[in-house]
Image (cartoon, rainbow, N blue to C red):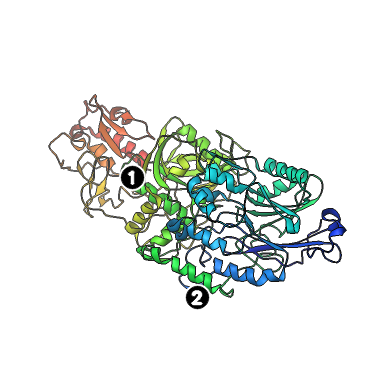
Amino acid sequence: MKFSRSASAIAASALLVSGASAQLQEDSLHSKRNLGKRFIDSEGNYNISFYHINDVHSHLDEFRSSGTDCTNKTLGCYGGYARVKTVIEESRPGHNDSLFLNVGDEFQGTLFYSYYGGEKIAETLNQMGFDGMTLGNHEFDGGPEKLAAFLSNLTFPIISANIQSNNSILNATIKPFHIYPQYELAVIGVTTEDTPSISSPGAGTTFSNVTEAVQNTIDLIKSTTNITRIAAITHIGYEEDQKLAEATTGLQLIMGGHSHTPLGNFTGAVGEYPTIKTNKDGDEVFIVTAGKILAYHGAPIHLTNTTEQDPELQAQISSWRGPFEAFAAEEVGLSNVELGQTTCRRSECLLGQFMADAMLAYRLNQSDTADFALINSGGVRATIDEGPITRGEVLTSFPFGNAIVEIEIDGEELWKTLEGVYTGINQYNQKTVTSIIQVSDGIEITYNSNASNGSKLVSVNVGGEPLDRAEVYNVVTLDFLAGGGDNIFQKKTTFSILDTQDEVLTGYIESQSPVNITLVSRIKNANGTVTAQPTGTGSGTTTPTGSASPTGSASAGRLSREGGSGLVTGAAGVAIAIKKNGNENSKAPWAPRSSSKDKTSPPKAPFSAEFMEVQPTDTTQTLAEKYRDLATFLGQGGFGKVRLARKSDSGKVFAINKHLAKKPLSELYDLDPQKYPPDQIPEHVERKLQNKFEKLCT
């Protein structure tokens, strides 16, 4: 078998079309008796063109390179199915023997899916002339019922050999392979085995081993038909495609998707188009995928402004925007920087950090138990451009409708969870972790990529303190991840559902506008590499300059500043005047806490244990009356050391600080409050107390 590298090809990923012209040798694939067939040339070679597309993610219309809507055509617009249709209709007549195949992940990514579900996607695909499609993991995001409704509206074969379902429509519609008798060719489809952990297929739909499913299907085809030419459309990722090619026999061509891997001879390409692997029999297998950066001839074609749009289809797509356009156009804030997404899948990224910080701030405004927030990079889908931010951009960037949750996890499990992220294998179930993470302020992670698997994690600091494996931490995350998504956490069955991700981000943008942030290195590689480099100039946290100043008193368990007066309303109902060396503390307690390791943050002023006159806001005995030292320290909420104090049933006052443990004040400060009431503390004891404060605050 031989692949003609000079043959024309068209390719596309989320925005673009792809095709590979395969020229397969007659002696291994076809008898000379078939020379009369039009796909057999005068030299006995078998000729057929494959056009393939993958990972469109509901980008029916043209869009920016960042994945957002194309509102300014002068900045460059790409893709859209109206352009795909133009290229296919212009190119296909010149290749009489051809197939147009879809490699999955049509769902999720824009308001076309958020608003219409699969309805308009199905209408579009039916107009494109597809000859077959395999399913991506995102086709299952809405559950089996929504997928069944989508498949019922399609007019071409659906192919996946490793899906088994008790849903009657899925079971009747999805077939392991499809034979194209006019070309004496079979096409097998497969879907990533990770789908249950990264989507929502339901308990009644399972995904078997890809390699076994493909080989069993090849054997079935060969034993029951006269077909010897077999290709595959695989939504499993480029690396898995290469493994599949080497582990099977009887397969000649793989058209892949899932990993968005660009192949070809151009800057940014990960491999050659085609990538050639040798199978178990020593025969060549050709692997092609459609990536994001495209070229012409024997590689993907880039669909830009210069590619004409099919006018009829474009008119339809434009008309579908009407119902959601006004909602999507509502401005929720302003950003002075581009909130980038493009590096999220391989390192820390600005939009990922901003989202995690938004989740932490949201939860801390309800309860001060949260330690940090963590999200999966795979859920960050598009850049938010500099300038006005709209609801449509927020939904395009975070389209999955995930809910914010808080889970409790002990230090030992947290360590193993993070070890799994950087080893790539969940340390509990030994399954592949399918996404890296983005984290908020409040946690610092160091790992060594050169260390052996299971030993890559070097250190974890939470709230500026080393991880205590016996302590329990409160992690703000997504319901998808808490339920085992991406195999990051052990699956949780008990957690509280809070607001949705897009609403939390919208509220955070409104409160922080104009957003003016830079990337912070919270995850470091101990081999000398930082997982993310700052974008733009300057440094700091992902907290915008300036601080929010909500008005009104806080509810129990919350600290809030009354305007700019320097007064903080504490959980005990106490108005606390705060000073550090005579200056009002300007750090709002609800703001994300600066990491003690963040060398770019302004240096902390030396702490002065100056006990000031405090007026209680009620007539009951308050913390400030009995423990002014603690009340003053509570005012330093920005340090994140002690955020809450309370009386136990026994009447003892405890500092609730998970990193110092729940200790009575007498034990925490080596001070007996019965012996030394706050207004009668000897000078030598006060000096000792001040030293304790300084140690805690630096």
Q: Which of 515 and 686 is in front in this view?
A: 515
| Residue type, mark 2 in image | Thr
Task: State the count of labels.
Answer: 2
Question: Residue beneath label 2, please?
Answer: 74
- Tell me the number on the disc at residue 116: none
Task: Kindly indicate the quadrant of the structure image that contains residue 180.
Answer: bottom right
Sequence-earlier tag: 2 or 1: 2
Location of the C terminus by quadrant is top left
- Residue 554 in the figure: left or right of residue 36: left
Residue at disc 1, secondary structure: helix
Q: Tell me which residue sits at (30%, 50%) in the image.
A: 588
- Residue 12 in the figure: left or right of residue 95: left
Q: Where is residue 365 in the image (x, y as percent from the top left)?
A: 31, 46
Q: Nearer the viewer, residue 615 or 584?
A: 615
Q: Where is residue 133 in the image (x, y as percent from the top left)?
A: 61, 54
Question: Residue beneath label 1, please?
Answer: 364
Q: Residues within 10 Å of mark 2 (few under 14, many from 20)?
A: few
Q: Tell me which residue sits at (70%, 46%) in the image.
A: 244
Q: Distance between the residues labelled 2 and 1?
A: 42 Å
Cβ atoms under marks 2 and 1 closer than 8 Å: no
Q: Where is residue 266 in the image (x, y as percent from the top left)?
A: 67, 65
Q: Which of marks 2 and 1 is in front?
A: 2
Q: Which of 395 and 156 is in front in this view?
A: 156
Location of the N terminus by quadrant is bottom right
Specify whether residue 532 is in view. no
Task: Kindly indicate the quadrant of the structure image that contains residue 662.
Answer: top left
Q: Tell me which residue sits at (25%, 51%) in the image.
A: 584
